[in-house]
Image (cartoon, rainbow, N blue to C red):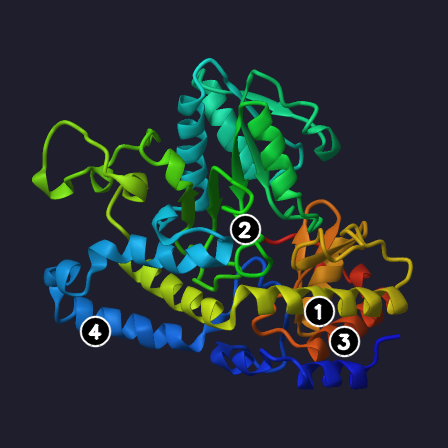
Amino acid sequence: MPTLAQARALDASDPIAGYRKQFALPAGVIYLDGNSLGALPLGTAARLGEVIRREWGEGLVRSWNSADWIGMPRRVGGMIAPLIGAEADEVIACDSTSVNLFKLIAAALAMRPGRKIVLSEPGNFPTDLHLIFGLEAQGLAERRLVPAERLEAALDDRVAVLMLTHVHYKTGAMHDMARLTRAAHEAGALVLWDLSHSAGAVRVDLNGCEADLAVGCGYKYMNGGPGAPAFAFVARRHQSTLQHPLTGWMGHAAPFAFRDDYAPAPGIDRLLTGTPPILGLAALGEGVRLIAEIGVERLAAKSRSLSQFLRAAVAEIAPDLPCVSPEDPVPRGSHLSFRHPKAYAIAQALIARGVIPDFRDPDILRLGLAPAYLRFEDCWHAAQTLGMVLANEEWQNPEFGERAAVT
């Protein structure tokens, strides 16, 4: 059985433990929802203060040039690139994950004329599937949803793009990116990966897997803040032929020439649409800078260790609580999910005791493991608290039964 002494020994030998002090973590709170909204880096307030007071307050419109605001999407994207196995000129920070998904699904369909099927799995993150629906309603796409174990068999000459979330948002199960990308290419299809639950916590090697397209969000393991800009990846080999469906002025080859006709910018810049959100990008840049400094290899290694420790601790305390995440840590992301018919009420009871988990409808209690700042001791205390909530049946408290909005 994992013990508190073991947890403290693991924390003492953790090579990245010192980075915890660079995050704002409220006293008396164990935060197990960093896979939904990352904690605030302490440097973010200072960075935003600089942008607001000096760059905006003093520089005014001149800061588009003097502070290189205009280059911020490319610059922050370049910082993200090594965290996902990409080159700096293949990633750009812009828009939201949903908008970037729309752009890249539509672009992939245009790159495979005569094919209309977007292949994915049922239970994928809803926005991914909803965006296929929107394109289908326009007559541009056709959905094909099959269980994960049948994806390769479903790849035929009608599939334009295979679109999958690398780490499943509920279970934490991780797809074999290299194998599925290879299978899609053999069928003549492109692959679009959603890295929202991967980037910044687990190893991702887009170029090593010869991936085509990818998106990801900035507010989870990247710690960019609520509603932070997302990012998009387009492999260099596709950039010259990619047709951006949202042809806004910032994606123009000469945006400040103010021409009526549209000509796409060269390279990854063509994925831009409207004016970059400078404050959001500045905050995201600070979060990414810190995650990049820690290093994705060290983060991934600690993530696996944390999840193994927490899984063992919960299994000892609540052996009848089924874990729906893969038992093997290799094909598992950085969260553990447990099934219980009163998962929502259990989550609320944990929050009342100072442990903040996550709930996913209808019956999933999700415990996120943000390795940049979570301790093994936190995991031990969280397991103990979960055990008390279950043993005392605190989930029966009527106050915890009414669902509130969750993200």
Closer to us: mark 4 or mark 2?
Answer: 2
The residue where tag 2 is placed is: 205
What is the distance, in whole Å, between disc 1 and disc 2 at their CAs? 22 Å
Closer to us: mark 1 or mark 2?
Answer: 2
What is the distance, in whole Å, between disc 4 and disc 2 at their CAs? 38 Å
The x and y percentages for residue 242 are: 35, 31
Q: In this view, does 228 lie to the left or right of 195?
A: left
Q: Answer with mark 1 or mark 3, whichever residue precedes in sequence.
A: 1
Give yes or no for contact between labels 4 and 2 (Cβ–Cβ under 8 Å). Answer: no
The residue at the point 83 percent across, 80 percent down is 3
Task: Give the amino acid type for the residue marked by disc 2 in the picture.
Answer: Asp
Closer to us: mark 2 or mark 3?
Answer: 2
The residue where tag 3 is placed is: 380
The residue where tag 1 is placed is: 306
Task: Give the amino acid type for the residue marked by disc 1 in the picture.
Answer: Leu
What is the distance, in whole Å, between disc 1 and disc 4 at their CAs? 40 Å
For residue 121, above or below residue 275: above
- Total numbered labels: 4
Give yes or no for contact between labels 1 and 2 (Cβ–Cβ under 8 Å). Answer: no
